Amino acid sequence: SSQSVDPGTSSASEPGSSGAEGNSSSSEAASSSSVADCPAYVTDSRGGTDVTYDILKFTADGVDKCWFKQNLAYNYSTSKCYGGEQKNCDKYGRLYLGNSLTAICPEGSHISTPEDWTHLAKAMGYKSADFSTGTFVYDMGWDLKAEAEWSSCTNCTMKFKDSYGFSALPGGYYIAYMEKYGEMEETGRWWVVDGEDLGYAEVYYDNDDVKY
């Protein structure tokens, strides 16, 4: 799931992992706001443990939006560590089910929307992007992905640039009804909420697009 943070609040969280139809996978935090100033970081104290997330600011069309740099790590009751191993939560954040999205965001944050992703793409220079139509943005994946951590791509001609510090990680996914984990180190997914509908933005290790 991915979440957005309103700048200036005392606590907020980055987007969690994304997945549809009960799938969940870890993802970078996303936050949006029309407020000009984003905090340098926010701290989530739920569960008795302080977790601090760094905040990134992106500007497009005269509007600033704030995104969490790290993946959401709130230990919600139905969330998962990939493969049931804590070390994967420590590295990639937790995996969240779609029916938990209203409960996992800290105060002042929200799961990302198509509008948030469109704004992010435009802030990165992809001026014609429009995630509201359920589409993909060519090349944006190179700017999102962390330079390391992803599986090697023998067919790739470009190195992941991580141009804006988003540092997207390949946390994989979890399909609840199949009790199946998949594609860690190969894919990253971020929950996207569009009214009553759930979807996800997705990046693969061997592809330069962001798909939604």
Image: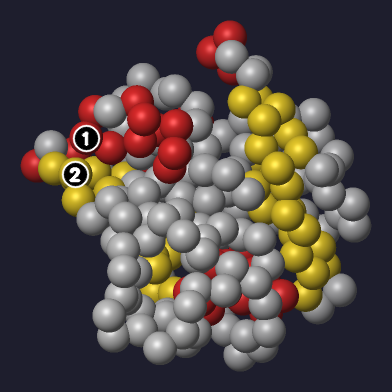
Helix, strand or loop at label 2? It is strand
Q: Which residue is painted at 66% across and 61% down in the image?
A: 165
Mark 2 is on which residue type? Tyr
Residue 28 appearing in the image? yes
From this view, report whether residue 190 is shown above or below residue 144: above
Q: Which residue is painted at 68% across and 67% down in the image?
A: 164
Mark 1 is on which residue type? Gly
Q: Earlier in the sequence, mark 2 or mark 1?
A: 1
Q: Nearer the viewer, residue 37 or 154?
A: 154
Residue 27 position within the rendered picture, expressed as x and y whole percent measured from the top left? 46, 50
Coloring scheme of the render?
secondary structure
From this view, report whether residue 162 is shown above or below residue 148: below
Q: Quadrant of the C terminus?
A: bottom left
Using a 10 Å C-alpha cutoff, classify the residue at mark 2 as few (fewer than 14 neighbours), some (14 to 19) or many (20 or more).
many
From this view, report whether residue 29 is shown above or below residue 9: below
Q: Nearer the viewer, residue 188 or 13?
A: 188
Separation of disc 2 and disc 1 at Cα? 6 Å
Residue named by callout 1: 83
Disc 2 and disc 1 in contact, CB within 8 angstroms? yes
Residue named by callout 2: 181
